[in-house]
Structures are given as structure tokens and as C-alpha cells.
């Protein structure tokens, strides 16, 4: 079902910059404010970058249904490691997002009740950020030919396993999923079959990871394995105990990067937007990076 959505208004750059300076003035020292003001004046000078970008936004608004929607590569230009985290609350939407079956969300505040564009919601489980030597690429991993069997990737002891969440396009029960997870944990215990902790590569600088990925994809088995990881709905990370006291700092480090490469750091895949972390004493859903959608979207999906 399609719903007509009111076109989002476009702010005037000069007004936005004046508001920005008013806010900054109360937050920084006088010298820092003078520096910020100088940058703003240069940005909005006639014929400057601000005027150019404002014209581009006007053009985009004329050509697109939702000019606010983030272009795929806007956040893919950062070549630094992408380790970020946010708390979420449930997995009820896991099967609804890929099928575009979520109820249409509505705005809050002054526009309360107005329907919102749902495009970002459906990128949450179907997208992956692929590394590049110059810039990353955001890809949407789904099939337009026929429905694909949905799967998640389970990481345990730095190894990655495919877990199909459906059978004959019917969702598996919680009991069946638990049985599969127990089998994966037993398989991960076989030390003689363990592979190097390849998940660590996704925490490297993006250029280095891009070069390593190019080497890996030259092998057919590696290429197929990467494809399964990149097309999964999300990751479930079954972490080993860290051996650290459960302080707020240590819990944050465990969620962010598994407390380093010497503990659970290789039990992650930072190119996917969502990862579910489970250990003996805690479980969280956390978000690694914001390329696929804005900050508020996952909170709405999982609330």
C-alpha cells in the first residue's frame, strides 16, 4: 500500500547557519567561536560552497520523492574503522523488514500523525557496506527474481556459520533456532577445523580491508562465504567470557569491539548494520554504523 507523503520543506542555508552560530556561541570559548564564525562566513560567502550545496539540494528536492533520504555513498567516504554501538531492545521486526511489512510510521511533534517515508527501515536488514580503496559502497542485498531463504550469520569463537531462519519460507520456531545454535556452538569447539579470525579485517582501516577483501574474493570458496555474510539479515555473536569484571566500562568495551583481538574482537563483522551479542552474563543488540539509515530508524523498528 502506498501513501502520499507531504514533501519535506527545505531550509534556507543562511538561516540554518545563523541558528548554528547562536547555539555554538554558548558552548565554546570565545576564541573557538571566532574560528567557527570565520568558517561559517567563508562557507556562506556569495559563490562559495554553501551557495553551491544549497542549489544542489534544491535540484535534489525537485527530482526525488524524499530529498532528506541519505544518498548511498554519503557516509561511505569515511575510510576509518567503523566501530559504533547503540542499544536496541528486541528482534520482533526481523522478519518484517525484509518483506517490507512494517506498518507505516508517523511523525511526532508539530507534524504528529503525518506518514513517514519507510525507505530507511527496509535497508536495516538488507544492506551491507563494502570496503573500497577510495570510498566504500553501500549495497542492498536482496533478490528481485524470487524470494530468498532468509538467514543470519552466527559467529562463535571467531568462526562464522550460516543459520537459515526459515524452511520452505516458513519461519523456524524458537525451539528450532535454539537447537541450531547449540549445534553451532559444538561445531565451533573443534579446534582442528578453526579458521583464522577473519572478522578482525573488518575493524581495520577501510583501504586495508578493501585490499584484503580483493585477495580473498579471488578464491571461489572465500567469495561464496563473503557473499553469505554480506547478504545475512544480521549477525548473532556468541561471545566467550571476557574474564573481566562487569563494570560499565568493560561492558561497553565488550559491546563495542569484544574487548580487543585477544578476546572477542574477531567475533564481529563491522560491515553489517546490526549485530546481536550474547554471552553467559549479558545480551544486547547493537548497531555498528549508520551508513544504511539514520540514528532514529532502528529505535523505531525495535520498540
Image: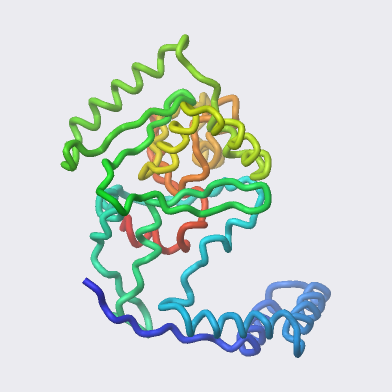
Location of residue 239 with respect to 150 vertically, above or below = above
- The residue at 36%/61% (across/down) is 121
* 14 relative position to 174: left or right: right
Closest to the observer, 42 or 211: 211
Image quarter of residue 207: top right
Location of residue 132 with respect to 227 vertically, above or below = below
Image quarter of residue 173: top left
- The residue at 35%/21% (across/down) is 185
Quadrant placement of the C terminus: bottom left
Residue 155 seen from this side: yes
Closest to the observer, 136 or 153: 136
Q: How is the image coloured?
A: rainbow
- The residue at 38%/28% (across/down) is 161
Instruction: Report x, y in % for residue 83.
Output: 57, 46
Quadrant placement of the N terminus: bottom left
> What is the total number of numbered labels drawn onto the structure image?
0
- The residue at 50%/48% (across/down) is 288
Instruction: Report x, y in % for residue 73.
Output: 56, 60
Location of residue 244 with respect to 109 vertically, above or below = above
Instruction: Report x, y in % for residue 85.
Output: 50, 49
Residue found at the very far top of the displayed protein: 192
Residue 240 seen from this side: no
Instruction: Report x, y in % for residue 91.
Output: 30, 47
Closest to the observer, 223 or 186: 223
Amino acid at each position: 500500500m502506498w501513501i502520499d507523503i507531504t514533501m519535506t520543506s527545505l531550509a534556507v542555508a543562511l538561516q540554518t547557519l545563523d541558528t548554528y552560530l547562536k547555539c555554538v556561541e554558548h558552548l565554546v570559548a570565545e576564541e573557538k567561536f571566532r574560528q567557527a564564525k570565520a568558517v561559517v562566513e567563508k562557507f556562506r560567502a556569495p559563490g562559495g560552497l554553501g551557495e553551491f550545496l544549497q542549489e544542489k539540494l534544491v535540484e535534489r528536492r525537485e527530482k526525488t520523492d524524499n530529498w532528506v533520504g541519505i544518498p548511498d555513498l554519503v557516509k561511505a567516504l569515511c575510510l576509518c574503522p567503523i566501530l559504533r554501538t547503540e542499544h536496541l531492545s528486541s528482534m520482533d521486526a526481523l522478519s518484517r523488514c525484509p518483506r517490507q511489512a512494517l506498518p507505516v510510521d508517523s511523525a511526532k511533534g508539530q507534524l504528529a500523525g503525518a506518514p513517514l517515508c519507510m525507505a530507511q527501515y527496509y535497508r536495516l536488514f538488507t544492506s551491507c557496506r563494502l570496503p573500497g580503496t577510495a570510498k566504500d559502497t553501500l549495497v542492498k542485498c536482496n533478490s528481485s527474481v524470487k524470494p530468498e531463504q532468509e538467514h543470519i550469520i552466527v559467529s562463535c569463537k571467531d568462526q562464522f556459520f550460516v543459520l537459515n531462519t526459515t524452511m520452505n519460507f516458513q519461519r523456524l520456531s524458537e525451539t528450532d533456532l535454539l537447537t541450531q545454535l547449540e549445534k553451532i556452538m559444538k561445531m565451533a569447539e573443534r579446534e582442528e577445523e578453526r579458521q583464522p579470525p577473519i572478522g578482525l579485517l573488518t575493524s581495520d582501516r577501510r583501504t586495508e580491508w578493501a585490499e584484503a577483501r580483493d585477495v580473498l574474493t579471488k578464491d571461489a570458496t572465500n567469495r561464496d562465504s563473503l557473499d553469505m555474510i554480506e547478504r545475512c539479515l544480521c549477525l548473532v555473536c556468541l561471545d566467550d567470557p571476557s574474564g573481566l569484571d562487569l563494570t560499565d566500562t568493560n561492558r561497553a568495551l565488550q559491546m563495542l569491539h569484544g574487548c580487543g583481538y585477544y578476546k572477542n574482537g574477531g567475533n564481529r563483522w563491522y560491515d553489517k548494520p546490526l549485530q546481536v551479542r550474547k554471552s553467559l552474563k549479558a545480551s544486547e543488540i547493537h548497531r555498528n554504523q549508520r551508513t544504511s539509515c539514520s540514528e532514529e530508524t532502528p529505535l523505531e523498528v525495535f520498540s
